[in-house]
Image: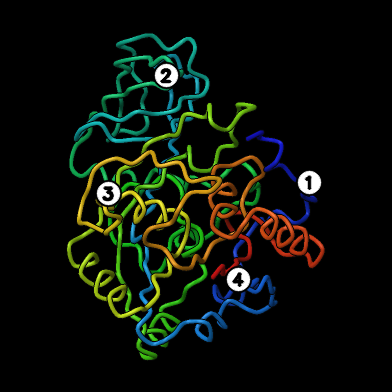
């Protein structure tokens, strides 16, 4: 499969620079993949498409303020982007500019936080050991900035707008953006209608959003991310399946988490670990019956996933229609329901 099959032209003005307020007033493109129909709604209309007994699966990961600015001992300013925690004090990071920083040299972020370069990895990422007094999380909350994608140039005034209202725990360096549309009030209405809410966890990494660089997508090497599917969630979903109710995944991260946690018979099981699942083409979905998702970058693994779920021709037509109707794209953009 050639990567150009997943490319498209997007007018720059359709790349959302800020979140809609209230959250649930973004647009919603509703796609019925069996009947090949499209409806234009608002996100708060999502409740009209959910039925009693359905299970809505949320990725309750929390985004950390992963962007830090520090100085070398000679005063040169460095940008440090936390990617993945290795142990209590050690992180894999992106550093800019990093070329002249030698093993053992220090970066000073504040009086309470500094780091030492331990390793330069083959892919150019660095490994830093942080030294601090007190709680690293509290220091990071004070010093760090939310890790907005590079296509968002406007400053984020409120950190919580790049966090779902249901974020619970974790160390994501990017938001599970489909969940940004939910408000606490909308979730309450959904529960009152008899829809069951279940949770999974996947710490979203930067690799999720990066375009695929190889010509043949089969040559693409997927990034891996830490995930967990709790026993309680497995019981909820397996019971729903037994009673012919739907499982609706909020976001591609929830899809990938659920589809990573099945046994050889295709049954959902409780598990945790790291997943590098790559969903494309004629992949057979074992757990997920419907997806709530945003509009994704060209050539990304995410557009390949939704194309596999909704059918490539139908998703191509939906993206074309969304551009015509001036839907807002990417992290702070509008959403779609595919069922």
Residue 336 at x, y percent in the picture: 60, 67
User: To which residue does mark 4 refer?
Assistant: 34
How far apart marks 3 and 4 lie (CA) works out to 49 Å
Identify the residue shown where x is 52% and y is 70%. Answer: 181
* Marks 4 and 1, the one that precedes in the sequence: 1
Q: Secondary structure at mark 2?
A: strand
Residue placed most toward the observer, 250 or 215: 215
Residue placed most toward the observer, 172 or 106: 172
C-beta proximity under 8 Å, tags 3 and 4:
no
Q: Secondary structure at mark 3?
A: helix
Left or right of 291 on screen, residue 304? right
Query: Please, is residue 127 above or below residue 41 in the view?
Result: above
* Marks 3 and 4, the one that precedes in the sequence: 4
Q: Nearer the viewer, mark 3 or mark 1?
A: 1
* Marks 3 and 2, the one that precedes in the sequence: 2
Q: Quadrant of the C terminus?
A: bottom right
User: To which residue does mark 3 refer?
Assistant: 138
How far apart marks 2 and 4 lie (CA) works out to 58 Å
C-beta proximity under 8 Å, tags 4 and 1:
no
Q: Residues within 10 Å of mark 2 (few under 14, many from 20)?
A: some
User: To which residue does mark 2 refer?
Assistant: 72
C-beta proximity under 8 Å, tags 2 and 4:
no
Q: Secondary structure at mark 4?
A: loop
C-beta proximity under 8 Å, tags 2 and 1:
no
How far apart marks 3 and 1 lie (CA) works out to 42 Å
Q: Nearer the viewer, mark 2 or mark 4?
A: 4
Identify the residue shown where x is 56% and y is 67%. Answer: 338
Query: Please, is residue 155 above or below residue 125 in the view?
Result: below
How far apart marks 4 and 1 lie (CA) works out to 27 Å
- In the rendered structure, find residue 294 and report the number of the disc placed on it: none
Identify the residue shown where x is 30% and y is 28%. Answer: 114
User: To which residue does mark 1 refer?
Assistant: 9
């Amino acid at each position: 499969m050639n990567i150009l099959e997943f490319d498209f032209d997007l007018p720059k003005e359709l790349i959302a620079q800020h979140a809609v307020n209230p959250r649930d007033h973004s647009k919603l493109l509703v796609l019925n993949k069996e009947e090949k129909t499209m409806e234009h709604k608002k996100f708060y209309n999502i409740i009209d498409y959910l039925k009693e007994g359905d299970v809505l699966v949320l990725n309750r990961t929390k985004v950390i303020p992963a962007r830090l600015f520090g100085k070398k001992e000679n005063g040169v300013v460095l940008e440090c982007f936390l990617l993945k925690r290795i142990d209590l004090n050690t992180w894999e990071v992106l550093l800019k500019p990093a070329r002249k920083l030698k093993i053992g040299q220090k970066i000073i972020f504040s009086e309470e936080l500094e780091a030492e370069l331990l390793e330069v990895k083959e892919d150019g990422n660095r490994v830093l050991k942080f030294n601090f007094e007190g709680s690293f999380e509290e220091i990071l909350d004070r010093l760090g900035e939310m890790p907005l994608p590079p296509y968002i140039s406007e400053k984020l005034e409120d950190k919580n707008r790049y966090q779902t209202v249901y974020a619970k725990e974790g160390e994501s360096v990017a938001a599970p953006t489909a969940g940004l549309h939910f408000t606490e009030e909308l979730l309450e209405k959904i529960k009152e209608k008899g829809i069951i809410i279940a949770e999974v966890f996947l710490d979203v990494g930067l690799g999720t959003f990066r375009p695929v660089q190889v010509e043949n997508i089969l040559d693409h090497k997927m990034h891996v991310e830490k995930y967990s599917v709790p026993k309680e969630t497995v019981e909820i979903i397996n019971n729903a399946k037994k009673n012919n109710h739907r499982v609706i995944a909020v976001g591609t991260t929830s899809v990938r988490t659920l589809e990573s946690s099945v046994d050889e018979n295709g049954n959902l099981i409780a598990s945790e670990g790291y997943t590098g699942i790559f969903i494309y083409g004629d992949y057979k979905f074992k757990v997920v019956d419907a997806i709530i998702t945003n509009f994704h970058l060209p050539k990304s693994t995410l557009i390949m996933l939704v194309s596999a779920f909704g059918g490539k021709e139908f998703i191509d037509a939906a993206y074309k229609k969304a551009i015509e109707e001036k839907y807002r794209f990417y992290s702070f953009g509008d959403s779609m329901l595919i069922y």
